[in-house]
Image (cartoon, rainbow, N blue to C red):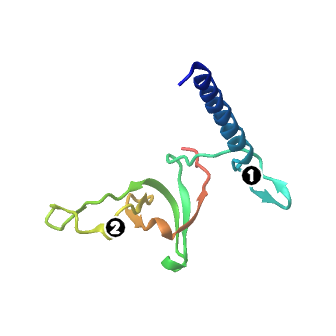
């Protein structure tokens, strides 16, 4: 290859790369904020504070049941303890269930898909 051909090849690659980046920037999907009543919701993001207590309302799958004043403590793993105390991996159905703790320290295990919504409750002064 001649030196001139190499220069054209390099320039062509650079122009092609610039065009690809330009078109990608123009046609990329820009996330749109949800709207209520034709107005965009403020762009403020919230994180669930797991140190707080919540009311959890479950879907109709759970009969529309609710759990009040509970704290989210974690989720189940792939292993479950048998009544003998040994770990078993034979309970895949219970994998990744939400674990919440009631005021009296009893735990409730909820399938993730059954949770409809959380309602943060006011913290009482101690």
- Residue 6 lies, in percent from the top left, at 57, 24
Vertical side of 110 occupied by 63: above or below: below
Q: Give the residue at x 23% y 68%.
A: 90
Callout 2: helix, strand or loop? helix
Q: Earlier in the sequence, mark 1 or mark 2?
A: 1
Which of 117 and 53 lies nearest the eye of the viewer? 117
Outermost residue, right side: 38
Callout 1: helix, strand or loop? loop
- Residue 122 lies, in percent from the top left, at 62, 52
Report which residue position mark 2 lands on. 94
C-alpha gap between disc 1 and disc 2: 35 Å
- Residue 13 lies, in percent from the top left, at 61, 32
Quick check: 69 left or right of 122? left
Outermost residue, top side: 3
Q: Give the residue at x 32% y 57%.
A: 77
Quick check: 107 left or right of 113? left
Q: Give the residue at x 74% y 56%.
A: 34
Vertical side of 64 occupied by 27: above or below: above
What crowding class fits label 1: few (fewer than 14 Cα within 10 Å), some (14-19), or many (20 or more)?
few
- Residue 27 lies, in percent from the top left, at 72, 48
Vertical side of 60 occupied by 4: above or below: above
Q: Give the residue at x 18% y 68%.
A: 83
Report which residue position mark 1 lands on. 33
Quick check: 95 left or right of 65? left
Which of 80 and 50 lies nearest the eye of the viewer? 80
Outermost residue, front side: 2
Which of 15 and 111 lies nearest the eye of the viewer? 15
């Amino acid at each position: 290859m001649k030196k001139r051909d190499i220069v054209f090849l390099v320039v062509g690659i650079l122009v092609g790369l610039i065009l690809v980046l330009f078109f990608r920037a123009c046609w990329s999907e820009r996330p749109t904020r949800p709207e209520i009543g034709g107005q965009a919701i403020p762009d403020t993001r919230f994180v669930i504070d797991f140190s707080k207590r919540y009311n959890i309302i479950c879907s109709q799958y759970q009969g529309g049941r609710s759990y009040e004043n509970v704290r989210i403590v974690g989720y189940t793993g792939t292993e479950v303890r048998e009544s003998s105390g040994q770990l078993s991996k034979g309970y895949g159905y219970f994998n990744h269930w939400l674990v919440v703790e009631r005021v009296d320290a009893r735990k409730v295990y909820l399938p993730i898909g059954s949770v409809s919504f959380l309602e943060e409750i006011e913290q009482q002064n101690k």
